[in-house]
Amino acid sequence: MFTECTADLDRVGPDRFTQRVDGVPGKRGRAGRSGIIAAFRYSAGAMNPVSEARVREILGGITDPHSGQDIVASGALRGIGVSAENVSIDLQLGYPALSWQPILAARVRAALEAEPGIAHAAVGVSSRVASHRVQEGLTPLPNVRNIIAVASGKGGVGKSTVSANLALALHAEGASVGLLDADIYGPSQPRMLGLSGKPDSPDGQHIEPKRNHGIQAMSIGFLIEEDTPMIWRGPMVTQALQQLLSETQWVDLDYLVIDLPPGTGDIQLTLCQRVPVSAAVIVTTPQDIALLDARKALKMFEKVNVPVLGIVENMATHVCTNCGHEEAIFGNGGGSRMAEQYGVPLLGSLPLDMRIREQADGGTPTVAAMPASDLAERYREIARNASGRLSVRARNKSIQFPKIVIQNT
Ligand SMILES: Nc1ncnc2c1ncn2[C@@H]1O[C@H](COP(=O)(O)OP(=O)(O)O)[C@@H](O)[C@H]1O
Ligand SMILES: [Mg+2]
């Protein structure tokens, strides 16, 4: 994936430079005697243009909330051009950020133009997703750059709803995304994504993912009848899921989101050992009992050396459908306390909101149903926070990037 945004490119280019060479001085082009004085002052300044080191220092003071690092430390800085009082900057983020690129570009430009030696700054921001390291001894899937596992300590906390909206939010930010429903005991992604029927298998060996709302999806729910009782034993579950994962013909994914079976038993542990995942996200509700289970999930990923990108706190507050009043019915700040205690970020919180349930259960989750809403923005922020944290982790050197799609924004 490759997306691009440029702040103020119209202000770059030969015109401005010609203007300066022509001797029209000053930022604000004053006339008359004071203009001449300003011209002298200004050209005196221009003889001491800003240094590249100073530009780098300014950029190093700007933190990207999604990666948690400043834009130099995160590796986003690709190039600096300094020509007298004009500066141009090229930034490349390692995560999808269509809605954030223009905001970051404007912030960087403002920070640079606040510097006395800089008259104009042109800032280009693009995104490109790399493949990140998986557990030792495992090989990443060929068409999938990163697998993100979504887990919860127990069922019913909204893991599937978060998985679906997270996948759609990564897509909304510009990434190519797949969703694998691995919840063998209660596959709910067919319903949440509005998909049904058996998947196609043109060669009788591989299966094609189904598509809706711009993402690719596969679920054990496509392959079995809805009312078939599933009395599977551990090894069968793991084998079935590994098969589903490797036999699905994913097409060039930046991220494959896996909706794991709830809980932290042997099946989940085995899956986390066998599936080449780059990172995990843990979903919890704020009650103490759910947080206790979420801690077990954290420990499970620690055991198998899978980094946890952070915690999503679901149903953190309740929004009254009648009056809009928001109340923390389960108590305040459970997710952030847990995040603090275990040194993992809180990626975001979602309220208990009837629209989230209605839309997910109706086949068009909130991010697709109401893209302009505050709720959808919360999911997109969670997606940027998760993928941003992943972007600063170690890369997988073995995967090449033959295909680059350029989208102009
Ligand atoms: N933030 C939320 N607000 C309202 N309803 C929600 C929210 N998150 C999930 N739900 C609903 O709660 C139920 C359980 O969610 P689900 O995602 O299936 O949980 P899990 O996968 O953890 O078992 C579903 O009906 C879902 O629509
Ligand atoms: Mg579920």
Image (cartoon, rainbow, N blue to C red):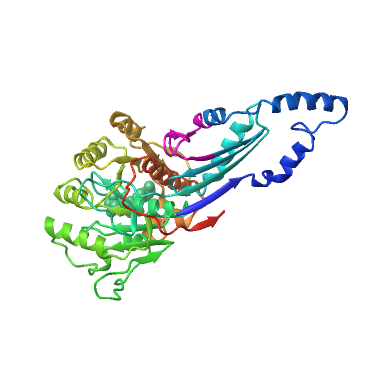
The answer to whether residue 61 is magenta is: yes
- In the image: residue 407, left or right of residue 134: right
Q: In which quarter of the image is residue 118?
A: top right
The answer to whether residue 396 is magenta is: no
| Residue displayed at 31% across by 66% down | 249
Instruction: Where is residue 292? Give x, y as percent.
Output: 23, 36
Asked whether 55 or 180 is in front, the reply is 55
- In the image: residue 312, left or right of residue 6: left
Instruction: Decide: is 370 above or below 196.
Output: above
- In the image: residue 343, left or right of residue 129: left
In the rendered image, which quarter contains the N terminus? Answer: bottom left
| Residue displayed at 33% across by 36% down | 330
Q: Is residue 180 visible?
A: yes
Instruction: Decide: is 360 above or below 153.
Output: below
Instruction: Decide: is 231 above or below 316.
Output: below
Asked whether 110 or 9 is in front, the reply is 9
Asked whether 16 or 244 is in front, the reply is 16
Instruction: Where is residue 112? Give x, y as percent.
Output: 60, 32
Residue stretch rendered in magenta on the structure: 59-79
Q: Quadrant of residue 345?
A: top left
- In the image: residue 268, left or right of residue 92: left
Q: Residue furthest right?
A: 32
Instruction: Where is residue 366? Give x, y as percent.
Output: 44, 54
Q: Is residue 363 visible?
A: no
Instruction: Where is residue 102? Give x, y as percent.
Output: 56, 44
| Residue displayed at 27% across by 76% down | 203
